[in-house]
Image: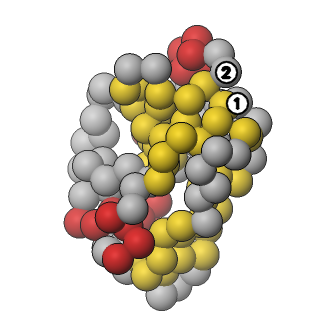
Amino acid sequence: MSLPQDRKYQASHEWILKEGDVFVVGITHNAQDQLGDLVYVGDVDVGATLSAGDTAAVVESVKAASDIYAPVDGEIVAFNEELDSNPALINEDAYANWIFKIKPNNPSDYDGLLSAADYEAQA
């Protein structure tokens, strides 16, 4: 599967997409493929202020649980509530289903994240 070119990536398998003054964050197809069928997505604390690299969410599958990390310093402003009742949406299309939104302290931090090509090279 080719990676969407309209977003940035982290080595820890999150994708990040600019949407106005917030960043939308989800996990890559590679991550959901390795995890298998997701049974839980959550532990997102809307209103929390996080530093880049802090745990922002948790995903659990029949195989394992995995932390999802904040790509930048900022405030969590939304959780994708559809995932409460249907975490498998991420398995169906990892790039169409976001997990949380973060309002960055410094929007230019986006520029320092991995391009699709850089992510593919290290994945």
Within 10 Å of the Cα at label 1, are there few (<14), some (14-19), or many (20+) other Cα atoms? some
Q: Seen from this angle, which residue lies furthest front?
A: 47
Q: Residue at x 58, y 80 (%)?
A: 64
Residue 44 drawn at (x, y percent):
59, 58
Q: Residue at x 65, y 16 (%)?
A: 106
Q: Earlier in the sequence, mark 1 or mark 2?
A: 1
Within 10 Å of the Cα at label 2, are there few (<14), some (14-19), or many (20+) other Cα atoms? some
For residue 119, above or below residue 38: above
Report the coloring of the rendering. Answer: secondary structure
Image quadrant where residue 102 sits? top right
For residue 6, above or below residue 52: above
Q: Read off the residue under disc 1.
A: 73
**CB-based contact (under 8 Å), mark 1 and mark 2:** yes
Instruction: Locate residue 71 relative to residue 27 in the image: left or right.
Output: right
Q: Residue at x 54, y 67 (%)?
A: 42
Q: What amino acid is at disc 1?
A: Asp
Residue 98 drawn at (x, y percent):
38, 50
For residue 88, above or below residue 18: below
Image quadrant where residue 107 sits? top right
Q: Residue at x 54, y 41 (%)?
A: 77
- In the picture, the disc for residue 65 is none
